[in-house]
Amino acid sequence: MKTTHHFNFAIAVCFTTLFAACQQQAQRPSHANWADSSFIDKDSTTNPSEDGYIDQQYCFLNLSGNRKTQDSSYVSLTINGEKVSGNHHWSPFEKDGRAGTINGLKRGDTLDVVWSFMQEGMQDTLRTVFLLKGDILKQKPYSVDQQVGRQVTDNQSDFSIIYKKVSCEDL
């Protein structure tokens, strides 16, 4: 009973945090690493507004784990031309999560961002690559670089982490 209460509370906190994140003004991104652009869909185009920018906001949710709801990950994005900014929160069940901002670039339907997050009281960054296709956001998984002992985006993998679009106002 107590575990269920804590789990429900954690989900409520996550949804509240995501709602607040979706309501924030977008920050200008600082940079993104485009050293490996082999996964970019060069055939995809954008349709900028008259001022040359697209200013669109998206929110996505991924639920996974043993019960398909234990682990949650939220992404809120603002796309302004080729610039991407937003928030990313990863909340694994009964473990320390990661919460922070994302900033980077959009090329075609590929978003290459730097996720600046806080985990276990430590600030860190991690390059993250997404693929935006309609109402679906896909992410390349991470692997561990054994030489440095850190997680990195696995450029050789498919976009295997799937997020579904949700209304930012409903969270």
Image: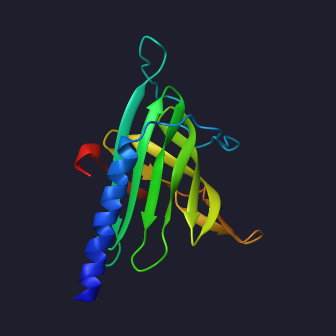
Taking the view exactly as shown, the residue that stands out farthest to the top is 50
| Place of residue 118 in the rendered image (x, y in percent of width and height, measured from the top left) | 57, 63
Q: Is residue 60 visible?
A: no
- Residue occupying the point 43% across, 24% down: 54
| Place of residue 30 in the rendered image (x, y in percent of width and height, measured from the top left) | 64, 38
Taking the view exactly as shown, the residue that stands out farthest to the bottom is 1
Q: Is residue 157 visible?
A: yes
Taking 128 as reference, is 146 left or right?
right
Taking 82 as reference, is 7 left or right?
left
Can you say which quadrant of the picture contains the N terminus? bottom left
Q: Is residue 104 above or below residue 69?
A: above
- Residue occupying the point 60% across, 66% down: 143
Residue 90, quarter of picture: bottom left
Q: Which one is in front, 166 or 100? A: 100
Q: Is residue 100 above or below residue 27?
A: below
- Residue occupying the point 49% across, 15% down: 52
Residue 62, quarter of picture: bottom left
| Place of residue 3 in the rendered image (x, y in percent of width and height, measured from the top left) | 29, 85
| Place of residue 130 in the rendered image (x, y in percent of width and height, measured from the top left) | 49, 47
* Scheme of image coloration: rainbow
Number of numbered markers: 0
Residue 31, quarter of picture: top right
- Residue occupying the point 35% across, 62% down: 14
